[in-house]
Amino acid sequence: MSAVSLVVFLALVALVCGALVWGVRRVAPRRVRPVGIGLGLWLGATAALAASGVLSAFDAVPPRAPIVLLGFTGATAALAFSRLGATLAQLPLWALVGVQAFRAPLEWLLHRLWSEGVLPVQVTYAGWNYDIATGLLAVLLALALWRSDVPRRVVGAWNGLGLALLGIVVATAALSLPTPFQQFAPSTEAILTVPLIWLPAVLVQAAFLGHLLVIRRLRADAASGP
């Protein structure tokens, strides 16, 4: 990874973590400190896990990496449907949508990492990853929500599209790992090393969390009536 790519990657991780802290500060100020500590522990623990080489033991039965990555997703879902998740869902809808704009520069970065020989083509927009559309549309939709009311079905459609595109790239990356289930090559095993472990452990989870919070918000709005 080049120095430019490393800086951009770390900046995106910091941006996403900062957005979460900002959101907590806005709706639940007393939880800022524990959330900040939790984020620090999560970053450190996932980096240590990747550095240990445990995730790269692809000869283990069953393979550890897919189980751990699935655990990341489970933890994110638990957070989204927790009391803290309910509180975060009270953020302005434009903010819940707008934070997903980070996915546009992230897709540019993934393409750059492919050109540097770090990641395979299938997880970029030169391959099977079209998630850049989610980030670009998030900017337009967030601006529209900020300036005026937008039909909730439009927000729901964008959210569904974003979830689908996220699912495609996650599935492609998982099926590119050198496990008995591998369907695509070259391998994506670089995402299991430091610092790229924060791609599935932080950036992907941030995108997933954002979609789940939008779902909670839309359901709450529907329940409250017109």
Image (cartoon, rainbow, N blue to C red):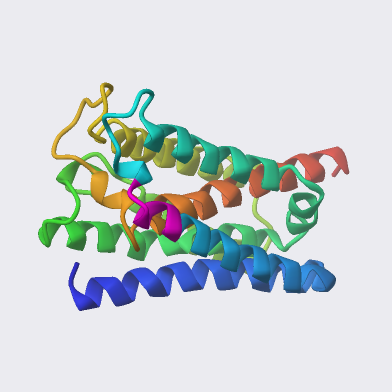
| Residue 95 position within the rendered picture, expressed as x and y whole percent measured from the top left | 63, 64
Asked if residue 198 is among those painted magenta in the image, a careful observer would answer no
Can I make out residue 136 in this image? no
* Near-viewer residue (169 or 178): 178
| Residue 216 position within the rendered picture, expressed as x and y whole percent measured from the top left | 72, 43
Residue 138 vs 78, above or below: the answer is: below
Residue at the far right in the pictured view: 224
| Residue 192 position within the rendered picture, expressed as x and y whole percent measured from the top left | 33, 49
Asked if residue 52 is among those painted magenta in the image, a careful observer would answer yes
Placement of the N terminus among the 4 image quadrants: bottom left
The answer to whether 53 appears left or right of 122 in the picture is: right
* Near-viewer residue (189 or 211): 189
The residue at the point 57 percent across, 73 percent down is 18
The residue at the point 36 percent across, 48 percent down is 131
The residue at the point 30 percent across, 57 percent down is 107
Can I make out residue 93 in this image? yes
What count of labels does the image hold?
0
Q: From the image, give the main secondary structure of the stretch colored magenta.
A: helix
The answer to whether 53 appears left or right of 198 in the picture is: left
* Near-viewer residue (69 or 84): 69
The answer to whether 45 appears left or right of 79 in the picture is: left
Residue 131 vs 112, above or below: the answer is: above
Residue 162 vs 118, above or below: the answer is: above
Placement of the C terminus among the 4 image quadrants: top right
The image quadrant that residue 219 belongs to is top right
| Residue 12 position within the rendered picture, expressed as x and y whole percent measured from the top left | 42, 69
The image quadrant that residue 84 belongs to is bottom right
Region of the chain picked out in magenta, as a range: 47-53
* Near-viewer residue (27 or 178): 178
